[in-house]
Image (spheres, rainbow, N blue to C red):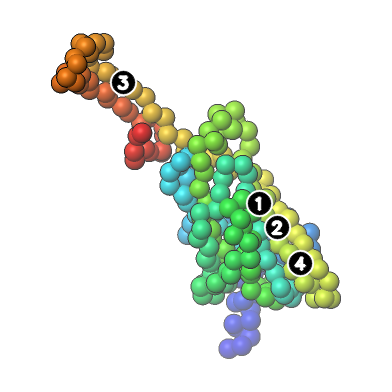
Amino acid sequence: MFQIQHLARNMAFMLVLLCVSYLGVNAQGYTSMVDLRNVVGEPQPDNIVLCGESDTISVIIAATDAITNATFTAHLPPNVYWDGYVGGVDQTGFPVVFPIVNASPNDPEFEIPDLTDQTYVKIYFTVKADCGLASALQAQQPININYETNYTDPSGAAGSDTYMPPQEYNGSFFTPVVNITAITPQSASIPADLNGSNQLVRDITVSQNGINAYVDNIV
């Protein structure tokens, strides 16, 4: 039974490495990272609305040897922020707690559990974007997120790896587009009234035309 379980574990880890290799990864030292966009069953950052809803980014962190005292940092671009949630699972699907090391909204850092050879964790965290990101999206500037691990390697030395997904995150963000489609009456004037009893009522029709975006209030 032990041999079967050990073989199954090795096969599962090989599948992870194949997935990591296929999706694009940077393995400089003892960790490999990859974002899990387009991986079936994983949370997807497919509906981050500027000035609105946040969504979840998923990253897998795999070890090629024993590491301890490890942390994971997401370096977010301007106008994109950590929204306060972090969670995840280990390779068995058991929930993992990722204590917060640095709650910076731009560079959140979390502890990750000690990993041994052929083990991994998946970390999930939410991000949001403010309206300032609209200009970068309109200019088609690449929106990238850089990931970093820091750890103690098997020799006791400090190690660090970085990873930037080859695919930018532009497709994860959606911009509301608010248009005024009608004003009735189009023009009117308010007569002078010392008693302040005159009122002007106009109907204004507003539409939201941003694809996959929404607006829940207008000021």
At horizontal 79% and vertical 59% (from top left) the residue drawn is 28
**Residue at position x 73%, y 64% in the image:** 150
Q: Which residue is mark 4?
A: 30
Horizontal and vertical percent position of residue 192: 21, 11
- Return the disc, 2 or 4, that comes first in the chain's sequence: 4
Residue type, label 3: Thr
Label at residue 75 = 1
The residue beneath circle 3 is 181
> Which mark is on residue 148?
2
Residue 133: name its quadrant.
top right
Please tell me which of labels 4 and 1 falls first in the chain.
4
> Would residue 110 be found to the left or right of residue 64 on screen?
left
Q: Are marks 2 and 4 in contact (CB under 8 Å)?
A: no
SS category of the residue bearing label 3 = strand
Q: Is residue 119 above or below residue 43?
A: below
Q: Kindly report the distance in space between the C-alpha atoms of the residues bearing marks 2 and 1.
A: 8 Å
Amino acid type at circle 1 is: His
Give how far apart the Cα atoms at labels 1 and 3 are. 40 Å
**Disc nearer the start of the sequence (2/3):** 2
Label 1, residues with CA under 10 Å away: few <14, some 14-19, many ≥20:
many
In the image, residue 206 sits, relative to residue 103, either above or below, namely above
What is the spatial separation of the Cα atoms under label 2 and label 4, in whole angstroms? Answer: 12 Å
Amino acid type indicated by mark 4: Tyr
